[in-house]
Image (cartoon, grey):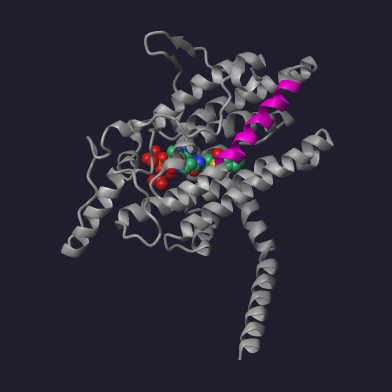
């Protein structure tokens, strides 16, 4: 048995159970009905396809609320990927060995690639990349709360791989089966890469935990700082999640925020034991009756303050993004000029 199997490490399998046994409409708010009779027919076809677990593709008719939900979620997800490059990117020049540096460069590059797949998926819904990036750079768009915290030591890089990417996989595997084709297909590749990211983080921590007392303390300190933030990554409790019901109805959100958070906790506790770290929650304990771990209360005030722009690194992250965008203007200009020149040449040759 491999260590990954022993610790219940995440796999790329997409067989997580969901509530698909129930018709998706059960107990949930119906999709608002279109007013025009021809649209009512299209709406009925759309609902039938969703209920049959079919895929919606870019050229298919879709209700505006479906399009809006997808643009919101996919663009936020894309922003999270490219902002997520920043806290780890800070450590590329300080990685402790050539091997760790090569791994970290590859990981950060993968995150950039995930952003590109996701922006492309969102573009199929009729929004432009410029519009989405403008929303990010002007602070109107959200991205994951988790990237607004500092990476203080090298152990943070390992913990981000283990816990942040671990939480991301837990949330993203069900998205491989979401109803919108381009998003679902993008997520398959993203999840495969995230699985590598999670394992490299865990392996880096395993090595540190066999090191000096100082190294072990550094890992524990990083776990203490990131644990609660990772639990909040899954979003507010279901009861306070305004988009969950409709996301489920649309077949976008397969599993709710609380259930995913619970799955993550249950999967992570044995991994922490193998690693030899303590998860910083005195109320964390196995509940025989529920067959799950009970846990303490998440600080939702702190979460919302961070989501709303007042976390420790929000301003720094946004400023770095805007600077990168401005510094890269000449590259985009040059690429466009080159494309125009090629197009002009092709037209001339065809004439
Ligand atoms: N941070 O009704 P809810 C990664 C917002 S990338 C900030 O539950 P929904 C990685 C939510 O957007 C990780 N905001 O919403 C990358 C909504 O605000 P709006 C990103 C959050 O959409 C690089 C409001 O709260 N993953 O892991 O049903 C390196 C109400 O929430 C957060 C994805 O984006 C948060 N944590 O559910 C390493 C996955 N949570 O839009 C790693 C795709 C909630 O009303 N997204 N909000 O202004 C999703 O699965 C869902 O959008 C969420 C939220 C579960 C995040």
Q: Identify the residue shown where x is 61% and y is 87%.
A: 350
Residue 68 appearing in the image: yes
Q: Identify the residue shown where x is 52% and y is 21%.
A: 267
Furthest-right residue in view? 98
Furthest-bottom residue in view? 351
Return the residue nearer the eye: 199 or 264.
199
Compared with 59, 222 (above or below) is: above
Q: Identify the residue shown where x is 74% and y is 38%.
A: 103
Counting from the top left corner in percent of width and height, residue 133 is at: 54, 58
Q: Quadrant of the image for the N terminus?
A: top right
Counting from the top left corner in percent of width and height, residue 266 is at: 49, 19
Asked if the stretch drawn in magenta spans residue 273, the answer is no
Q: Which residues are magenta?
A: 191-207
Q: Main secondary structure of the magenta part?
A: helix
Q: Identify the residue shown where x is 49% and y is 55%.
A: 121
Counting from the top left corner in percent of width and height, residue 222 is at: 66, 25
Q: Is residue 129 left or right of residue 106?
A: left
Residue 258, image quadrant: top left
């Amino acid at each position: 048995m491999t260590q990954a199997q022993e610790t219940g490490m995440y796999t790329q399998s997409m067989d997580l159970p969901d509530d698909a046994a129930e018709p998706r409409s059960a107990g949930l708010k119906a999709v608002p009905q279109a007013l025009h009779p021809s649209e009512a027919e299209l709406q009925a076809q759309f609902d039938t396809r969703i209920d049959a677990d079919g895929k919606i593709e870019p050229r298919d008719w879709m209700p505006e609320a479906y399009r809006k939900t997808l643009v919101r979620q996919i663009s936020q997800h894309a922003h999270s990927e490219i902002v997520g490059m920043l806290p780890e990117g800070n450590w590329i020049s300080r990685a402790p060995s050539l091997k760790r540096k090569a791994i970290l460069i590859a990981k950060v590059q993968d995150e950039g690639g995930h952003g590109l797949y996701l922006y492309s998926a969102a573009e199929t819904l009729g929004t432009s990349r410029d519009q989405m990036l403008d929303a990010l750079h002007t602070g109107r768009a959200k991205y994951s709360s988790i990237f607004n915290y500092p990476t203080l030591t090298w152990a943070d890089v390992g913990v981000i791989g283990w816990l942040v990417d671990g939480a991301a996989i837990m949330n993203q595997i069900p998205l491989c089966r979401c109803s919108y084709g381009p998003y679902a297909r993008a997520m398959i590749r993203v999840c495969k890469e995230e699985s590598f990211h999670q394992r490299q983080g865990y392996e880096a921590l395993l090595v540190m935990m066999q090191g000096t007392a100082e190294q072990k303390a550094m890992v524990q300190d990083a776990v203490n700082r990131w644990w609660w933030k990772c639990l909040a990554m899954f979003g507010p409790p279901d009861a306070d999640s305004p988009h969950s019901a409709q996301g489920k109805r649309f077949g976008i959100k397969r599993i709710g925020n609380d259930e995913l958070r619970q799955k993550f906790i249950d999967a992570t506790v044995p991994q922490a034991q193998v690693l030899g770290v303590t998860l910083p929650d005195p109320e964390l304990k196995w509940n025989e009756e529920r067959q799950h771990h009970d846990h303490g209360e998440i600080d939702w005030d702190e979460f919302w303050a961070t989501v709303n722009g007042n976390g420790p690194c929000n301003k720094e992250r946004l400023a770095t993004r805007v600077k990168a965008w401005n510094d890269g203007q000449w590259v985009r200009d040059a690429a466009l000029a080159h494309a125009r020149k090629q197009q002009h040449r092709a037209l001339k040759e065809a004439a």
